[in-house]
Image (cartoon, grey):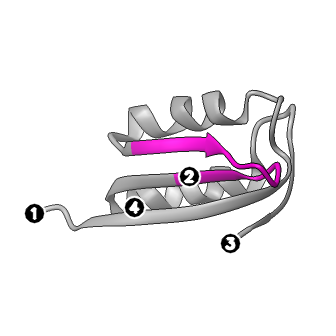
Amino acid sequence: MVSEARLHALVRGQVQGVSFRWYTQQTALPLGLTGYARNLPDRSVEVVAEGGRIQLEKLLQFLHVGPPTARVDGVA
């Protein structure tokens, strides 16, 4: 039985207008995760995902680095 969990992250830096949400989706879908990523008015990106703990850890690792077009200053 897979342990289901939820990740709620706020990603700060240069993360809007650089395809961050698309790259996040492309990372999450093959991992079997569900959820969403949305731009916030303060120019951060909110990511909510659900699935297995190991898969969520892999997504979180991606969020700390981001795509080549982004600059991640922090993840909370």
Q: Which residue is mark 1?
A: 1
In the image, 59 versus 40, the foreground residue is: 40
* Residue 17 falls in image quadrant: top right
Q: Earlier in the sequence, mark 4 or mark 2?
A: 2
- Per the model, the C-alpha gap separating discs 1 and 2 is 25 Å
Contact, mark 4 vs mark 3 (Cβ under 8 Å): no
Which amino acid, mark 3? Ala
Which of the image's four quarters has the C terminus? bottom right
Can you tell which quarter of the image residue 13 is in? bottom right
The residue under label 3 is 76
Mark 1 nearby-residue class (10 Å; few <14, some 14–19, many ≥20)? few
Query: Given the image, on which type of amino acid does mark 2 rest?
Result: Val
- Give the camera-side residue of 39 and 49: 39
Residue 47 shows which numbered tag?
A: 2
Q: Position of residue 65 (x, y in %)?
A: 77, 51
* Cα–Cα gap, marks 1 and 3: 29 Å
CA distance separating discs 4 and 1 = 13 Å
Whichever of labels 1 and 3 marks the residue nearer the N terminus, that label is: 1
The amino acid type found where label 1 is placed reads: Met
Q: Is residue 56 above or below residue 5?
A: above
